């Protein structure tokens, strides 16, 4: 949720003489609703719609947005289902029992997909997105640690969570909100995520868990979850410390099961206690829906699950929110039903193919060095080569003139010196669009090469476009 300060002034929306259905030029022109406070009276529905519609024309084109991981297209049948369910509150399971049943089916599907040892015993829930799912998983890790260390926690021991500096900001929020020390492993050289040695080196008796990321938002690479688990197995043999792993599969949790079936990262690893994913990323659903699963009931402390007597029945719930829409959950089940394994494999494979094609094409233009190639997540990062008179911020700025949103940003500690462009290829971004991007970039490069130096040397701010 964005935080906004109250705006001052007396700005008003101007209404053109022929705006609206009443075809009353003078009457329309008398309307001037204020921007920052309620008007004294109502505005006709068509007029209100048109005023907002026209302002939204200034938003970027979702199909040309290569910054976001979030789905920007769905089939009309899915959109119709969502429209039919806009009034359904996910929390009202007694009122909407079939919506609750579809949620249960989605959890069961994911339990099978992620190789839960007993899919019927795995527990899980839908959330508003991966951020909430990560918060819930973190709370379960903390509560399990508190159970095992009750006396030490009461005496002031401070729990910590181990992760790479590349994690999504929701993990920083979790640590800040629930008073957990964030132990982050910095990047080092060409290692842009958490490795097994770094993970083990940060663990101690106060560690509630280690977060492994299956698909870093910074460069699209998978963290070596199996190797991290093996290192923690060795740590337990040497020290007795039994530290669980949570896999943040916000994106990769819906890529690896279809394109990297031999990669062991999920509940096949006994140390993996929980996994989350974003239904609204490579789960192919509009925002916002996420999923959190635990390998068995023991991994989710019972005291975190509330039994709520609501609307005529007792309902177990584990969530940070109460009321939330059910439409996205229904849309997730639609995607599972619609595509099946083969369909998901085809869609995700096409995304990866386009990512590799685009990465190779950009590299072939010269002036760029690829850090990743889109062969894990359909996402790749690149930087400029030494000696060119432009930087990634110049490239991002110029591409935006043509409508392309390609974020440019600097990496975190200890690679703040490295600035990159990141390209996210999602369902709906076709090879044809990739060719158009390559053509536009090819036209821009001669102009960029004629610059005497990067524009930041003239004081032009390096505008970052990095958004998770």
Image: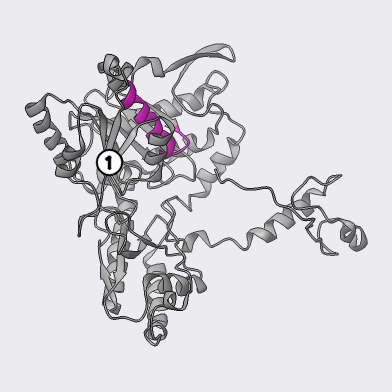
- Colour scheme of the picture: one colour
Q: Which residues are magenta?
A: 127-143
- Please identify the residue farthest to the front as the structure is shown: 155
Dominant secondary-structure state across the stretch colored magenta: helix
Q: Is 461 situated above or below 143? A: below
Q: Is residue 300 left or right of residue 54?
A: left
- In the picture of the structure, the residue carrying the numbered disc 1 is 163
Task: Report the number of discs.
Answer: 1
Q: Relative to 188, does residue 85 appear above or below in the rendering?
A: above
Q: Nearer the viewer, residue 90 or 127?
A: 127
* 196 relative position to 404: left or right: left
- The residue closer to the viewer here, 53 or 184, is 184
Of residues 452 and 398, the one drawn nearer to the viewer in this rendering: 452
Q: Residue at x 38, y 41 (%)?
A: 172
| Residue at the limit of the structure toward the left, as seen here | 238
**Residue 122, above or below 389:** above
Q: Residue at x 32, y 52 (%)?
A: 348
Callout 1 crowding tier (Cα within 10 Å): few <14, some 14–19, many ≥20: many
Q: Is residue 2 above or below residue 379?
A: above
Q: Is residue 246 visible?
A: yes
Question: Residue at point 39% right, 62% down?
Answer: 409
Residue 22 figure quarter: bottom right
């Amino acid at each position: 949720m964005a935080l906004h300060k109250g705006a001052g002034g007396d700005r008003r929306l101007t209404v053109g003489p022929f705006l609206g259905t009443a075809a009353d030029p003078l009457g329309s022109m008398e309307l001037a609703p204020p921007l920052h406070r309620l008007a004294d009276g109502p505005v006709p529905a068509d007029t209100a719609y048109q005023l907002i519609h026209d302002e939204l024309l200034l938003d970027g084109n979702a199909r040309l947005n290569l910054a976001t991981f979030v789905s920007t297209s769905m089939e009309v049948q899915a959109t119709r289902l969502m429209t039919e369910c806009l009034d359904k509150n996910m929390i009202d399971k007694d009122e909407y029992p079939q919506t609750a049943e579809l949620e249960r089916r989605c959890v069961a599907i994911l339990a099978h997909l992620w190789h839960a040892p007993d899919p019927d015993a795995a527990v899980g829930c839908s959330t508003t997105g991966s951020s909430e799912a990560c918060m819930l998983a973190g709370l379960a890790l903390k509560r399990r640690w508190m159970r095992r260390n009750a006396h030490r926690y009461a005496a002031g021991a401070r729990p910590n969570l181990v992760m790479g500096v590349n994690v999504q900001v929701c993990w920083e929020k979790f640590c800040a909100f629930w008073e957990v020390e964030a132990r982050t492993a910095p990047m080092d050289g060409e290692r842009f995520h958490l490795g097994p040695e770094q993970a083990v080196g940060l663990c101690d008796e106060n560690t509630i868990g280690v977060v492994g990321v299956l698909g870093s938002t910074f460069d699209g690479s998978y963290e070596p979850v199996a190797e991290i688990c093996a290192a923690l197995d060795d740590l337990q043999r040497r020290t007795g410390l039994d530290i669980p792993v949570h896999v943040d599969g916000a994106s990769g949790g819906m890529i690896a099961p279809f394109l990297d079936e031999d990669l062991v990262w999920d509940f096949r690893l006994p140390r993996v206690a929980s996994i989350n994913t974003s239904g609204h990323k490579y789960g192919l659903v509009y925002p916002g829906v996420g999923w959190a699963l635990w390998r068995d009931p023991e991994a989710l402390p019972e005291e975190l699950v509330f039994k709520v007597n609501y609307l005529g029945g007792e309902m177990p719930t584990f969530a940070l929110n109460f009321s939330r829409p059910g439409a996205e959950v229904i849309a997730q089940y639609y995607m599972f039903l619609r595509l099946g394994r083969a369909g998901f494999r085809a869609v995700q494979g096409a995304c990866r193919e386009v990512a590799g094609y685009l990465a190779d094409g950009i590299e072939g233009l010269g002036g760029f060095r690829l850090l990743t190639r889109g062969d894990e997540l359909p996402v790749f990062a690149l930087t400029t080569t030494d000696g060119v008179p432009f930087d990634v911020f110049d490239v991002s700025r110029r591409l935006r003139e043509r409508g392309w949103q390609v974020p440019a940003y600097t990496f975190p500690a200890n690679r703040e010196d490295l600035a990159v462009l990141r390209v996210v290829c999602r369902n709906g971004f076709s090879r044809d669009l990739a060719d158009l991007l390559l053509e536009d970039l090819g036209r821009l490069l001669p102009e960029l090469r004629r610059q005497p130096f990067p524009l930041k040397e003239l004081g032009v701010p390096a505008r970052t476009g990095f958004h998770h």
